[in-house]
Image: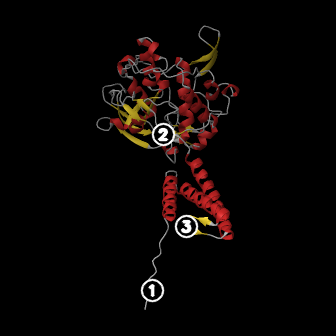
Amino acid sequence: MTTSTNVRYRPAFWVGIVGLVLITLLGLTDGWASALALACVYLALSAGWGVLTTRTWWGRLRRRRASVLLVVTMVFAGASSALASDGEAAGAQPSTTPIAASSTLSATGTSPTPTASRTPMHTSSPSPSVDPEGAERGTALAAVAMLTFKGRAPMTGYEREEFGPAWTDVDHNGCDTRNDILKRDLVDESFKAGTQGCVVLAGTFADPYSGETIEFERGEKSSLVQIDHVVALADAWQKGAQQWDATKREAFANDPLNLLASDGSLNQSKGAGDAATWLPPNKAFRCRYVARQVAVKAHYGLWVTTAERDAMIRVLSGCPDEPLPDGVKVSTTSSSGSSSGSGTIAAPPVTVPDHNSSTEPEAPVYYANCSDVRAAGAAPLYSGDPGYRLAMDRDKDGIACE
């Protein structure tokens, strides 16, 4: 003979179960630690009621057992809450993905239509604590203090043509600007016959933005190496260039101070990004890159946004002795002669070989090895510096004789 026992739960039991499930699901929206913490609090409240009345939604419970359950659930609730707080703090690092209009030009001389392109994300950082006012005179960090900073103007009216035709011969040396920059930044170049050493057909390029070496060849592979406006044309348009006349905008678009040969894909990904939204992946080059941006903006009187200024200071704070590009000097007075918060920078004259001249060109700088470079006090050599050769750059990062 067998006895069948049917266990029947009171309605309060099922109400309690439903409450526990709902509380747990509610906590899952903030993670498993939050869900566990809320469930423990729910059970602790039930145990606390059991201490007072010996009754809970799951049945009678002795006060001693209810007290033990209360303590255990409160401990678990506290531990779970701590885990949830740590997880929230670790994940609370906002990042921004600004969208900028592309204003760069390819090495073929063509001008892509400005399009919206996403620039790489950079995790936001606290405002820099370094004061550029106290930086050593002549450094890029000190020059940041001379920049005006205010909001970005709208892109209204921007067209690439506002900065003149792509790659004109502004210095009247017989070569367009694109080929001038390729000759400056490439090594082992070969030239098109009949152009008096003007049109670059091929060469080796140590890209400062990526640290990679690229073999340039004119034609289908021309776009592998492009000419980047360090301060993008669209960025300049939004920060003062709208008020310039056509002559000044054309000079800006062709100024070697503002031009660097670069990896084509990185040039495109940069778009119109400023220091706050885009930096070269090659961290070893970031100080020189930002220093050149500072020099260009100060020389042309372009302003910077607050975020851009803070980004410049953050980068240059890691290299406070980084100088401005060779020959660029900071003036502490404005063009009117009065003290100015924005200041001006005098850019060095650009010397490009005159292929029509009958005089002998200056002999190029040559070092047999890194020992000669160090003996001359020229170490380290960067890509584009006189005497730089890939043979002396072992890791091909654009810096020789480090």
Say what amino acid the circle numbered 2 marks: Met
Q: Amino acid at mark 1?
A: Thr
Q: Quadrant of residue 247?
A: top left
Q: Mark 3 or mark 1, which is nearer the start of the sequence?
A: 1
- Spatial CA distance of label 1 from label 2 is 71 Å
User: In the rendered structure, which disc, 3 or 2, sits on the residue that comes first in sequence?
Assistant: 3
Secondary structure, mark 2, is loop
Packing grade of label 1 (10 A; few <14, some 14-19, many >=20) is: few
CA gap between label 3 and label 2 equals 53 Å
Q: Alpha carbon of mark 1 to alpha carbon of mark 3: how far?
A: 25 Å
Q: Which residue is mark 3?
A: 58
Residue at position x 46%, y 12% from top? 243
Residue 207 picture quarter: top left
> Which mark's residue is nearer the viewer, 1 or 3?
1
List the single residue furthest toward the right. Answer: 134
Name the amino acid, label 3.
Trp
Image point (61%, 28%), residue name: 140
Work out whether residue 213 or residue 298 is closer to the camera in this orientation and state it: 298
Residue 70 visible in the current orientation: no
Regarding mark 3 in the picture, which secondary structure is present there? loop
**Image point (49%, 30%), residue name:** 274
Q: Residue 378: x percent and y percent?
A: 60, 35
Which residue is disc 1 drawn over? 3
Quadrant housing the C terminus: top right
